[in-house]
Amino acid sequence: MASTSLSALPAFVPHPPLTDSHGRVIHDLRVSITDRCNYKCVYCRTGEAGAQYPELGIDEYLRLIEIFVSLGITKVRLTGGEPLLRRGVVELVRELARLRTLDGQPLDLALTTNGHLLESLAEPLKAAGLNRVTVSMDAVDAAAFERITRVPGSFSVVLKSIRAARAAGLAPLKINCVLLRGFNDDQIEGFARFARHEDVVVRFIEFMPLEEGRLWSPEIVVPLREIVERIGQTLPLVELPPREASETARRYTFADGVGEIGVIAPVSQAFCGACSRVRLTSDGKIRTCLFSQVEHDLYGRLRAGANSEELRAYIVRTVQGKEARHHIGEPGFLKPSRSMVHIGG
């Protein structure tokens, strides 16, 4: 795949760190490369709409990511939908691995997947330069897992993929579980044991109003405190210090030091004040928050002929308008204009 390296981009005066109007430095870019998915998880796709938005060419994603990196982005995560459905994803990772941040370091490259196609791609992705992978997995009981994904046999496929990714050196390997009360909260203790037995980092995520339908309510959310207390009753936990201010998960190890879990608690303990992220949708729109009501058409400007400096200026202006926080659960709260599968995880 042809690529234009950062060194080949038109010269520009180095820009200060990409910062929003609230003083937060933005260094983390999440890029959805498709909103298609081969699973139909019941809490995510409560409807049957499927893919709704167009996809850019792989070279076009690379071009836009290069512009972000030239402004100080140091972490890139490829998401979907299911990103492994895209032809050329290994080549995209290979080209991204050649980029360098403003201080000359390689990008921190990660990918989030449901794991169904990962077994055969784990080694090629690692060889191409992928650092880490996160697998979305909402149950450790096979029957419960397949009830959630609505794909027969999916549990054994994903388990093989997790082990293949770990063997390939895509570490630390993280497992993300979205918890819903009365739906899969009976999996909490099982996931804690899974973290230890499979040598993975399990991260529980509080359910957010990002599904296609109208399922979300505050009563469905299983909060951080409850998760930690339940695990601690059988497997005592010790909280770990954050590695950086913008870290989204509260991290814990078990008392014997074997294994790690994390809890991402955007509902009960919002971390907006330290947010370092922006998102690029599969059709090239910038979203400054998961819960944005407005999108910013970066790709439209590229197609209209904007040069690199004009695109950089547009990104800077857009990031300046990043929301201070979300308003989940507050009077007048509106769900975002897209569901999670169409935004990018």
Image: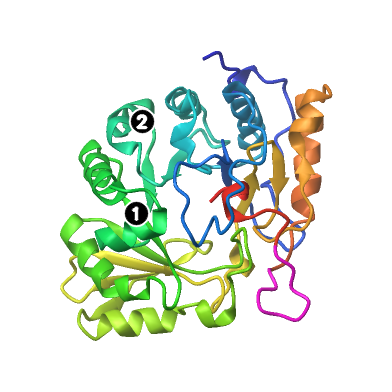
Q: Which residues are magenta?
A: 326-335
**Going 45% across and 78% down the picture, which residue do you hit?**
222
Please give the residue where the numbered disc 1 appears in the rendered image.
174
Q: Which residue lies at the image location 42% right of the left edge and 26% below the top edge?
A: 90
Disc 1 secondary structure class: strand
Q: Is residue 227 visible?
A: yes
Snapshot quadrant of residue 146: bottom left
Furthest residue toward top: 2
Q: Nearer the viewer, residue 91 or 333?
A: 333
Nearer the observer, 38 or 28: 38
Q: Which mark is residue 125?
A: 2
In the rendered view, does 330 fall on the left or right side of 269?
A: right
Q: Is residue 106 visible?
A: no
Amino acid marked by disc 1: Lys
Amino acid carrying mark 2 in the image: Leu
Marks 2/1: CA–CA distance: 16 Å
- Indicate whether 233 appears above or below 83: below
